[in-house]
Amino acid sequence: MRINELFFILFVLNLKDFFYRKKKYSIDTNGVVTKKSFSNIALIKYWGKQKNKIQIPLNSSISYSLEDVYTVTRLIYHLKERKKRNFSVRVFFSGKEENRFIPKILEFFHRISFYCSYLRDFHFVIETENTFPHSSGIASSASSMSALALCIMEIERKLVSSLKEDFFLRKASFLARLGSGSACRSIYPGLVVWGIHKSIKGSNNLYAIPYPYQVHPIFTEMVDTILVIDEEPKEISSSKGHQLMNNNPYAKERFKCAHKNMERLISILKVGDLQDFGELIEHEALSLHAMIMTSHPYFLWMKPNTLNVLYKVWDFRKQSRKNIYFTLDAGANVHLLYPIQEKKFIMKLIDNDLLSYCKKIIESFCK
Ligand code: DP6
């Protein structure tokens, strides 16, 4: 960590509480903690990180947590007999030992050990499962990193009995961010903001906060139907994609636009204007894809069936005047967002017109 970042954390944001430095433990030497954490879908997208900083976004983002799309993680801990400097961790995914996740977890432990000095003193076994199908192309890093961060905080709660709930969640979000940026938003249900925005009180780059303003009831009952178009892992990871923003010729305009879109969204959420909401989230989704298409090297995440679905959604909306809108994440899959009242019609549209373009469908409430 650079000196200026440390200074920023300690003094500007007064986050010195995030450090855990006690050496003696009043904790059972063996134990297990279990946590569940949601996936999320961003309405205003996080795409681009500040250079030479760890997981600091270049624009603020906001997402809905997805109630039915989640990860459950069990973290089994065992105090080491002799203190050693290295981390000790084994990972099981859906019951099977998976060594391919170890490097990412070790990097995560390394990043957060500054704030959780106790990590080196335990052997850990991580057992994790997702509710969503393994090969669905649904990003699992947000739900898995946030579930792991929550488990670690649960251990810290055993070490510090006076830990307050809001601190617990704030630090969990802070830690989750260091595993995967979007994971910091998964700590909270509902609408969640990450990244400094001048119009959002309390917003900051180090952890996410629940959206702090009035939300029209229509936006508290939204459904996300995920149309899985492609089950293959992406050709390019999100982390690499973020890096490509550093040399993207349109990056500056994109960050300005994301900032303005957040400003617009605040009033849309308040007044409950679904059409403006839809126009804004579709614009955001296409802007994200425009960024990857104009990076060097360039990529195209959409597949022919992604486009087939988008055109059908636009046609259906024109004909029926129903409020159905799409957003996209970093891949070919389409998230259809609509109010719960429209569910019957939309399911008909999906069954009749969209199902043939999809490998599978995953449904969730945005809660
Ligand atoms: C397109 O959070 O996966 O989903 O911080 O490198 O782990 P890392 O990236 P990640 O990026 C998510 C990008 C996105 C938009 C969003 O969720 O805001």
Image: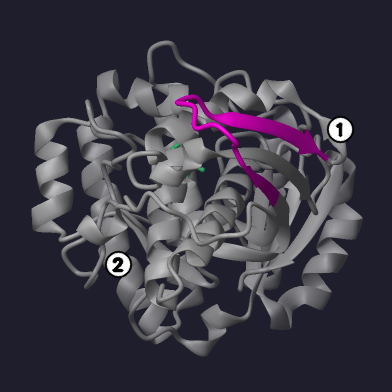
Q: Amino acid at mark 2?
A: Arg
**Relative to 342, residue 281 above or below:** above
Q: Amino acid at mark 1?
A: Lys
Give 101 or 336, whichever is nearer the viewer: 101
Give me the residue at 37% from left, 49% from top.
23
Which dot, 2 or 1, sits closer to the camera?
1
Q: Which residue is mark 2?
A: 264
- Determine if residue 219 is in view: yes
**SS category of the residue bearing label 2:** helix
* Residue 33 is a magenta residue: no
- Asked whether disc 2 touches disc 1, contact meaning CB atoms under 8 Å apart, the reply is no
Q: Which residue is mark 1?
A: 96
Q: State left or right for residue 186 relative to residue 31.
A: left
Give me the residue at 90% from left, 57% from top.
352
- Residue 305 spot, x, y in % from top left: 75, 35
**SS category of the residue bearing label 1:** strand
Q: State left or right for residue 41 relative to residue 277.
A: right
Q: How many marks?
A: 2
Real-space CA distance between mark 2 and mark 1, rounded to the nearest whole angstrom? 46 Å
**Relative to 300, residue 266 above or below:** below
Dot 1 surroundings within 10 Å: few (below 14), some, or many (20 or more)? few
- Which image quarter is the C terminus in? bottom right
Q: Which residues are magenta?
A: 75-93
Dot 2 surroundings within 10 Å: few (below 14), some, or many (20 or more)? some
Q: State left or right for residue 4 relative to residue 64.
A: left
